[in-house]
Amino acid sequence: MTHRRSILLSAMVLAVMSATPAWAQKKIVVGFAQVGAESEWRTANTNSIKETAAKEGIELKFADAQQKQENQIKAIRSFIAQKVDVIAFAPVVNTGWDTVLKEAKAAKIPVILTDRSVETKDESLYLSFLGSDFMEEGRKAGRWLLEKAKTMKGEINVVELQGTVGSAPAIERKKGFEEIIKANPNIKIIRSQTGDFTRAKGKEVMEAFLKAEGKKINVLYAHNDDMAIGAIQAIEEAGMKPVKDITIISVDAVKGAFEAMMAGKMDVSVECNPLLGPQLFAAVKDVVAGKTIPRRIVTQEGVYTMDMAAKEFPNRKY
């Protein structure tokens, strides 16, 4: 009887294992190469990825590239050597990834891009891109300014704080914004320079804009909230009032932006949702289970104005 029970038990274990998906039988290992920690947005993005991986029981090998492409490439090569199941990364810049992505493909390790895309002639080098539509974010900022311009007289001089040179959000937020503001010939970008997505650089560049253009500046368009907040400090130190003297348009909609809007120092922030962890690891599980995932996974986002800030602020998770 004991022998018979042993056979039955073994058969039951085999049946359970065969009914269990492959990804549930062993721990999934994911290598993730992050841009860095340049902003509130990036911190929230990193936390979402780490927390979701832990919640889902996924082993996460995390690398912080400190905003350097060479560091991300080293991290990806390390993930390949470690034979992780999936590689995910947020590219620092758009170009220069083909060689390392070919190495991942040769190793049969699928790659998912998060937050930012890459430029490549061979799109088979990555499986999917999960993130925001940066062009549309720029368009949303432009549409808001077109409406605002109806209440403004004469020429509307815009200074622009761009994100990291060569990065997808910097390129596309600029293009989308310019595409829309063309509809009003009074709106002109008179200065445009990178603030590298950081608060300190945003302040430094805005100080230079103010020295060069002074009261000619009517509008600031910042590619992220951290740069906008740095610029607001520069505006106030120059004896001017944000919103009243210079209209402030930004992107991200992090808590810092809501605090600025509630203080009457920022007009509007276009949302860029950093909480990509749940969508990323749902895609990872599908990939490991052999399922097909969409080529493009877009996050849902809104636009928040100063008069909406106090009501929305308690709901913000980042």
Image: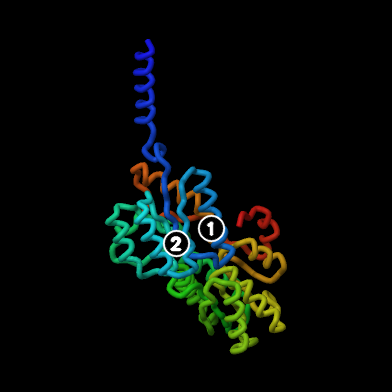
- Residue 273, image x, y percentages: 54, 58
Residue at mark 2: 90
Of the 4 image quadrants, the one containing the N terminus is top left
Q: Is residue 180 left or right of residue 156?
A: left
Residue at mark 1: 45
Image point (33%, 61%), residue name: 101
Q: Secondary structure at mark 2?
A: loop
Could you say which quadrant of the image residue 204 lies in?
Answer: bottom right
Q: Is residue 242 visible?
A: yes
- Residue 217, image x, y percentages: 61, 83
Farthest-out residue, bottom? 212
- Residue 83, image x, y percentages: 35, 51
Report the amino acid beneath label 1: Asn
Q: Give me the C-alpha separation between circle 1 and circle 2.
A: 10 Å
Image point (48%, 75%), residue name: 178
Mark 1 in CB contact with mark 2 (< 8 angstroms): yes
Question: In the rendered image of this protein, does residue 159 appear above or below residue 87?
Answer: below
Badge number at residue 303: none
Frontmost residue, 50 versus 131: 50
Image point (34%, 18%), residue name: 7
Report the amino acid beneath label 2: Ala
Q: Is residue 180 visible?
A: no
Question: In the rendered image of this protein, does residue 143 appear above or below residue 219?
Answer: above
